[in-house]
Amino acid sequence: MAPVATALTAVSAFIWWGILVAPWRPWSTRETLAAKPRNEAALDDVTVLIPARDEEDVLPQTLAALRNQSATLRIIVIDDQSSDATATVARAAGAEVISTSPLPDDWTGKLWALEHGRKQARTRWLLLLDADIELRRGVLPALRQRALDRNRQLVSVMASLRMESLAERLLMPAFIYFFKLLYPFALSNSRSRWVAAAAGGCVFIEARVLKEMGGFGAIRGAVIDDCALARAAKAYGYRTWIGLSHDVVSRREYRSLGPIWEMVTRTAFTQLHYSALLLGLCTIALVLACWMPVVGLFWSTSRWIAVAAWVAMAASYASILRFYRRVPLWWLAMPMIGTLYLAMSWHSAWQYWRGIRSRWKNRDYNRQTA
């Protein structure tokens, strides 16, 4: 048994050290964007599109923050068949409001709403913003400047997620960490078309990109719509950039495990391309990476290898924890974190095998409309 434990622990150490020394540094937080609060540049060439479905609680703060970017900024809220006072709240905050027509079978709700908004915009730039995202003053000029300075036609920012409840503190930093492992920002920001990523909560995009693609209809059935949009933009020869920011803030609350579970299961199996083989490989990799450093500590022949795995794990995760000002010792919870995300992935697969590709905002997207 000891030789087997030693071999498996060595594989775990290889995984963590591979992540740590990879030249594209997937764990790094060097790709960042900061607000420019003293920048008073006009934003007449930008239209903000906010798809909203039952978002009356978060919209006022989002819209007030947008008004702080520029008093003349055009803001369009697309009411996606809401059952609450979303439209009324948006109008009261000074936004233009349009409503979607009934959702076609082969579209996801968010993209259908954004397509309605795109057709109303006439500016060079569009900001695609989730209803719960608050932009600190000066972020929008910084987004535009990043696009112009680096000749990028799509710039997106991973919002700072709420990390106040126990479930949020445990899982939200890891959510961003795992996303960066799947989509290394350095590779996504390069010219390579093999890796393309965007963060759907805040996407700044040149309108001509969408026009050339044929609008959001080009990705109309995508569940992971942000990365699909970045991939499509790169396929047309455009450049993209994604980074982190403390000045783009999500106000969505996840007070317990349940809402986080629902959010992750919505896209987890999609991320694996609905492949049982990839799910199996992911299961093996996560079990080896997260649990063999623990198991290896109990065998004298693998103890130092396990310690080496823990060191690499801590070093790679520390970058995210430090960026979000979290207690560094949260890396000790990685076995539990990995197990929970693995369980969510299996639940996502189970839903798919039952015929439900994704479920969000009281809508089910079945396998037949994929």
Image (tube, rainbow, N blue to C red):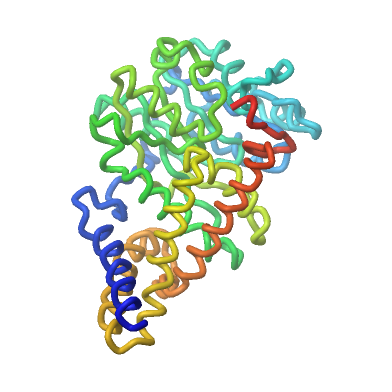
| Identity of the residue furthest to the bottom in this view | 300
Q: Quadrant of the C terminus?
A: top right
3 relative to 128 in the view: left or right: left
Residue 95 coordinates in the image, percent (x, y): 64, 24
Residue under the point 32% across and 34% down:
241
Residue 56 is left or right of residue 221, and the answer is: right
Looking at the picture, how far across and down is residue 237, in whole percent? 29, 19
Q: Residue at x 63, y 38 (%)?
A: 358
Residue 210, image x and y in percent? Answer: 44, 16
Locate residue 345 relative to residue 321 in the image: left or right.
right
Please state the horizontal and vertical placement of residue 324, each as a whole percent of the image.
42, 59
In this rendering, the answer to whether 120 lies above or below 188 is above
Near-viewer residue (145 or 282): 282
Of residues 16 and 189, the one nearer the viewer is 16
Indicate the quadrant where residue 144 lies.
top left
Give the vertical position of 280 relative to 309 (above or below). above
The residue at the point 33 percent across, 24 percent down is: 234
Which of the 4 image quarters holds residue 11? bottom left
Whether residue 149 is situated above or below residue 289 in the rendered picture: above
The residue nearer to you, when weighing 96 against 25, is 25
